[in-house]
């Protein structure tokens, strides 16, 4: 077998065998195949697609290119959560303490952010001292001790995905169902959890632009579950507008804490309850899971678990009661629009990009972050605004672009309507195995 | 403009603009774009194709990525010849002295061979001392002095093609009409001749498998002529069986000399006369061009020109009358078949591969050649053979594979028939501008 014959076969729209996919992905994972052959394979796969068998073999091969985390030492049901990426998406930090307070074990291997969607690790890094790297022993111990463990995804997990993922962005092969499926599920299956709730987003701030595409992707992702016999559910939700009001690392952590303290940021609360409910269901819970999720948020046990989580990881837990201890931007700018109306849309991708320019995100891998930078929205879809009302605050210190330009970008994200507009419906459906 | 957006557009089957193609090919030529983006572009182009405009812009951009040779100092009509590559194809060395003896100027920039089709430079290198690199001044001088100039193609000609060509083989993007057209015509147009005769081959030993594909490629190649306002014709000919009897560098040069001395190797003579006739027509000759071509071969003037050519380039011209002065293989093996019959096919690609294994060709760029190695066929399609007749001689010194294996490969190239078989019809048509 040789790599050119595998590329040729996919180029011609033929179905690859398990052996061929294994051979090619092995070569990607162990570094014997060059980037240009990987790129040709990615493009051929993007255009010609893969059937269910091929996608499963691809996912398996990528999974097997690295280590599979052994969580057999964890007592209880381990349930992971994965979001396909959104703007202002801080749901992980809300659901982890909620689920752990309800007795689930929540293992989280996360990455840093690149581009308009932020990374979980970056958000946790906004808490001074918070430890974001654990070896497997410490990871298992953390799960047994507090019900949560979080760590940077290690180099040993799905190295084939690591190489392909880095190439997809620069070869225009990102939004391909088999490639996305292989990438997400190889990593998630390698993390060794018993269950997984997927948060599959669609809209302008997400990879998938339409609900139909998101549902299709969700079905593909779920169909990989048998590879390691895990239980998987997926929420399909709308990412046209940013999630919550805060975009930026410290800002988002403050909003997480406010929600855990009881602030009714409706979309964050709604999605968090739905996800924790799904996690409970996957664990075999037969009671009223939604009620359980609501209660743990209302009765402060989720907040207490969050405090425990921060302290366990040597983070500065006093930050929870004193937001002034978070990294702060040195400058702020209030942003108003030149007209009045109902907010009919806040373009998530533009807000995400503006946040990157403020210093909250990375344009290139090697960029350093300003944890205090970001955007606070003061309104959401459906709200009425007058001319001159501040619709957002831009926080920045040394921004990546001129602040006036960023402000202009933010203004352009707002669409107004003369007629009243209903709030954005976030969760449109749930897909189960 | 950015490379990813160009790749994306072609990926989605859209038509690229001249500006986009220029931008991308410039980046390939000057080395700012990485191989993996070139590979993704090649695969997208392979699968989605290019229309006539795009192919013209691609060819232009590749041409403009490097130097265009200035032949304005040459007196007379300069006419180039290009073969899409065959097994035993030594036509260039026959037609160059024929055409030059008839007053045409024959500029030849050639390459080394890789794989089953040999390179012109390798064949000339089989003549001791023969100089195969000339700078532009010496090239022009050679054309004015003897009517022929030959040189290794320089690094400065179409560097964008150089990079893409090297990648196509290893990314399964070789047999694409727009990519082949861009590659061949960018180089040929850069060589600055007034006319060009293309020898477009089809069959098992060629890139194009069918006559229809060869005709299509020829039409595309010819349609690039207006880019530099040159005159182009194409012969379409069959490459199912090797050309002539000899395959291997010194062996082929011996056969060239024998044909120039009057040996009636029918397919070599037929194609050479047709090509020289086309060259004369392109130059504006209105007489009986076929007759002129036949005469120059019959009256010894082509042989005299060949002698002049070798001497001018400091090659050992005594070789012409004493073949023992050619590099010789140390061993030879006669190959017979286990049955009798009419030869109905001699699979050209297999013979070409066997010649590579004998040491006559390269498996990898860095391989060194054994100029004396190769295969001499003793029969051709239509001939009757008895059991035990030697159908071929394998010449080798240190072969790349076990000689018995190579012999077995050669045996497998022969197909026999109980019924009589007509000789292979080589030239099937001529396509003119």
Image (spheres, coloured by chain):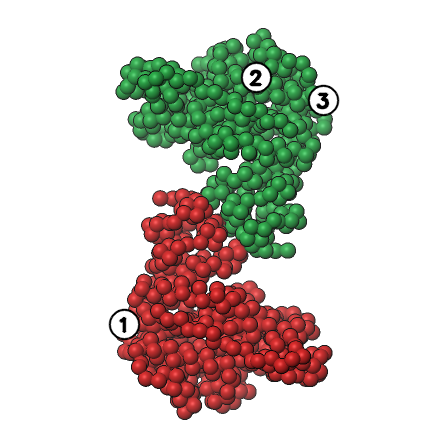
Chain colours: A red, B green
Q: Which residue carries the number 1 mark?
A: A72
Q: Is residue A355 above or below residue A219?
A: below
Q: Which residue carries the number 2 mark?
A: B273
Q: Is residue B393 visible?
A: no
Which residue appears at 48% of the width and 14% of the height?
Answer: B265
Q: Which residue carries the number 3 mark?
A: B75
Q: Residue B6, how many percent across, how many down? A: 59, 52
Along the line of sight, which residue is nearer the eye, B322 or A13? Answer: A13
Which residue appears at 49% of the width and 90% of the height?
Answer: A321
Q: Tell which tag, 3 or 2, sits nearer the viewer.
A: 2
Along the line of sight, which residue is nearer the eye, B191 or B298? Answer: B298
C-alpha gap between disc 3 and disc 2: 24 Å
Do marks 2 and 1 share a subunit?
no
Q: Is residue A9 visible?
A: yes
Q: Secondary structure at mark 2?
A: helix
Q: Secondary structure at mark 1?
A: loop
Q: Residue A23, how many percent across, how many down? A: 36, 50
**Residue occupying the far bottom of the picture:** A299
Q: Residue B369, how many percent across, how many down? A: 44, 29
> Mark 1 packing: few (<14 Cα in 10 Å), some, or many (20+)?
few
- Chain bearing mark 1: A
Proximity of marks 2 and 1: CB atoms separated by less than 8 Å: no
Q: Quadrant of the C terminus of chain B?
A: top right
- Chain bearing mark 2: B
């Amino acid at each position: 077998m040789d790599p050119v014959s595998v590329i040729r076969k996919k180029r011609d729209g033929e179905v690859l065998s398990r052996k061929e996919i294994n051979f090619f992905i092995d070569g990607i994972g162990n570094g014997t195949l060059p980037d240009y052959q990987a790129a040709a394979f990615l493009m051929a796969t993007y255009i010609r697609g893969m059937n269910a068998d091929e996608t499963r073999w691809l996912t398996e091969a990528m999974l097997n290119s690295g280590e599979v985390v052994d969580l057999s030492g964890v007592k209880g049901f381990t349930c992971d959560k994965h979001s396909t990426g959104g703007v202002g998406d801080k749901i992980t930090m809300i659901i982890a303490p909620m689920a752990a307070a309800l007795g689930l074990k929540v293992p989280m291997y996360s990455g840093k952010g690149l581009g308009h969607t932020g990374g979980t690790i970056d958000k946790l890094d906004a808490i001074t001292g918070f430890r974001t790297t654990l070896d497997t022993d410490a990871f298992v111990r953390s799960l047994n001790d507090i019900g949560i463990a979080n760590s940077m995804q290690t180099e040993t997990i799905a190295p084939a995905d690591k190489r392909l993922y880095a190439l997809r962005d620069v070869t225009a092969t990102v939004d391909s169902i088999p490639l996305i499926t292989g990438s997400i599920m190889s990593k998630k299956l390698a993390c060794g959890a018993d269950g997984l709730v997927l948060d599959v987003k669609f809209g302008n701030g997400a990879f998938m632009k339409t609900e139909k595409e998101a549902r299709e992707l969700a079905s593909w992702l779920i169909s990989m579950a048998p590879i390691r016999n895990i239980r998987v559910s997926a929420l399909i939700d709308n990412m046209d507008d940013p999630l919550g009001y805060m975009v930026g690392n410290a800002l988002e952590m403050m909003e997480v804490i406010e929600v855990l303290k009881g602030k009714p940021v409706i979309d964050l609360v709604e999605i968090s309850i739905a996800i924790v409910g799904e996690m409970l269901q996957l664990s075999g819970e037969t009671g009223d899971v939604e009620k359980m999720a609501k209660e743990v948020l209302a009765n402060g046990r989720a907040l207490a678990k969050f405090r425990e989580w921060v302290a366990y990881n040597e983070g500065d837990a006093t930050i929870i009661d004193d937001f002034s201890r978070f990294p702060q931007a040195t400058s702020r700018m209030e942003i108003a629009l030149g007209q009045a109306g109902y907010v009919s849309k806040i373009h998530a991708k533009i807000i995400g990009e503006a946040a990157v320019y403020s210093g909250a995100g990375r344009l290139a891998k090697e960029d350093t972050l300003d944890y205090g930078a970001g955007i606070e929205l003061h309104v959401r879809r459906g709200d009425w605004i007058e001319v001159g009302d501040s619709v957002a605050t831009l926080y920045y210190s040394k921004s990546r672009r001129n602040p006036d330009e960023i402000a202009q970008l933010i203004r352009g994200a707002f669409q107004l309507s003369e007629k009243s507009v209903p709030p954005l419906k976030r969760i449109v459906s749930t897909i189960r195995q």
